[in-house]
Amino acid sequence: MPRKEELKTGNGKRVSQGEAKRKNPEQRGTNSEGRSRKDAGPGVRDRREAFPEDRGRKDAALGARNWKEASPEDRSRKSTVPGARNQRDTSPKDKKQKKETNQNLCPVAAKCGGCQWINKSYEEQLRAKSTEFHKLMEPYCRPEAIIGMESPAHYRNKVHAAFGEDRRHNAVSGIYEERSHRIVPVDNCLIENRKADEIIVSIRGLLKSFKLRPYNEDTGFGLLRHVLVRVGHATGEIMVVLVLSSPIMPSKNNFVKALLKLHPEITTIVVNVNDRDTSMILGDRQQVIYGKGYIEDRLCGMTFRISPKSFYQVNPVQTEKLYAKAMEYAGLTGKETVLDAYCGTGTIGMIANRNAARVLGVELNQDAIRDAVSNARRNQIDNIRFYQNDAGKFLLEMAEEKASLDVLLMDPPRSGSSEEFLNAVARIRPGRVVYVSCNPETLVRDMKILTKKGYRAEKCVAVDMFPFTDAVEAVVAMVRNS
């Protein structure tokens, strides 16, 4: 077993890398909050948080590919895809009513561009996503029914706001207009956590009294660049991250007191310093100015630590369904050796440990590995070990040492897996591969390669992690041909 870069349970945690200004829905990039990893997905307002690696996750949160609606010719034919139905053109009166409804749901929807499907009912969204997913999967296997949300609103537990000034130098906060760096003022959002939105509005209201100015990208003048709020869905814990252009914040302690007076539910406040001319949201330096510097949340019966840069799925309700499907597809009996590739903070691997003899986790991001080790200790898990390494290289090392692997769990960034990694899979030949993807297009690309290397798709399902956006996640089970 490769030992060189191993970290045993008890040293650390996983962090995502700097978040970039979001522009389309979550999603994933590498395993930190920056350009890597899915964020998880898509996010509101066409944002793509950039995670250097959010696994390879370009904030991933954010959006998956654009799912194209059927052409007029396609619409005229009866769909043969389960869950889809014929769509008729609406009258001018219907279109006007729909536009008014959209404006009531979100007055800035047209400028924001994040909720691409705000003009569709949720049933229509699920049908459209199901239809597109069926088309992609058709050559490999027949998908199960798409898994939707019961209450598809205010699901994002991670909310980011960019700060700036209007022409009169009044502070504004919101999201970047689609394909631009112009800020669209937003006080509340259909898909964001309500309390997080309230906190951001309160911070904006405090700036003037503390003589703090938002950062100006053009002049380089000003202090506050972004605010990031993360909320523990199960625990209710709240983290506020103030992204500043300088480590010096005047009246810092008084500002904290004023904010806590308005929102005593806040459990920790962190200052993150980003003094570079970059599209990344988070910088490398940070200082805890209130609380413990992280929050905790419970998912699938386990407790996870969430730091400012940690990757953590933005829709915890659907995440439980996503991971439950992954475990179902893994078919663990308690005897298997399992590898959690692109493991991030170790979430999927720790859930798998309940029904596996041994679990390994590999992740390139060192902060993420530290989080993973910390999470394993927190949950008293002793049959899992984490390694800081490139997933492809790690698999090759295992193959060269003739190590056995029964089940491979992989959850790569939006860009998908690498050729090196897929070649390594073919060499070590696990009996089953469970692929969790935030980008169905790169998923299909990788499935095609694995099919040529002796695997076949057994079952698959789409999970709607990001209602009102064009993004979807998927789980596929592939088995080795005998």
Image (cartoon, helix red, strand yellow):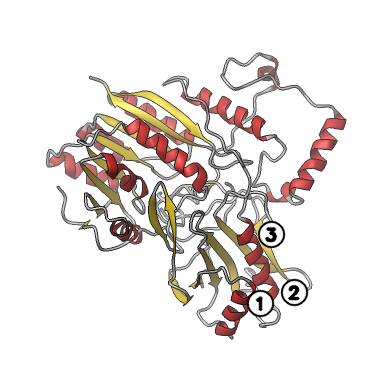
Q: Secondary structure at mark 2?
A: loop
Label 2–label 3 contact, CB within 8 A: no
In the rendered image, is residue 250 in sight? no
Work out whether mark 1 precedes mark 3 in sequence or the reverse, and give the earlier one: 3
Q: Residues within 10 Å of mark 3 (few under 14, many from 20)?
A: some
Which amino acid, by three-letter code, is at mark 3? Arg
C-alpha gap between disc 1 and disc 3 = 17 Å
Residue 166 horizontal side relative to residue 475, left or right? right
Q: Quadrant of residue 328?
A: top left
Q: Which residue is mark 3?
A: 182
Q: Secondary structure at mark 3?
A: loop
Residue 469 horizontal side relative to residue 420, left or right? right
Viewer-proximal residue among 149 and 109: 149
Q: What is the residue that sits farthest to the right in this orientation? A: 93
Which amino acid, by three-letter code, is at mark 1? Arg
Q: Is residue 386 above or below residue 404?
A: below
Label 2–label 1 contact, CB within 8 A: yes
In the rendered image, is residue 132 in sight? yes
Say which quadrant the C terminus sits in: top left
Q: Which residue is mark 2?
A: 169
| Image spot of residue 127 (x, y percent) | 61, 27
Which amino acid, by three-letter code, is at mark 2? His
Q: Which residue is mark 1?
A: 213
Residue depicted at 48% across the width and 58% down the height: 235
Q: Residues within 10 Å of mark 2 (few under 14, many from 20)?
A: few
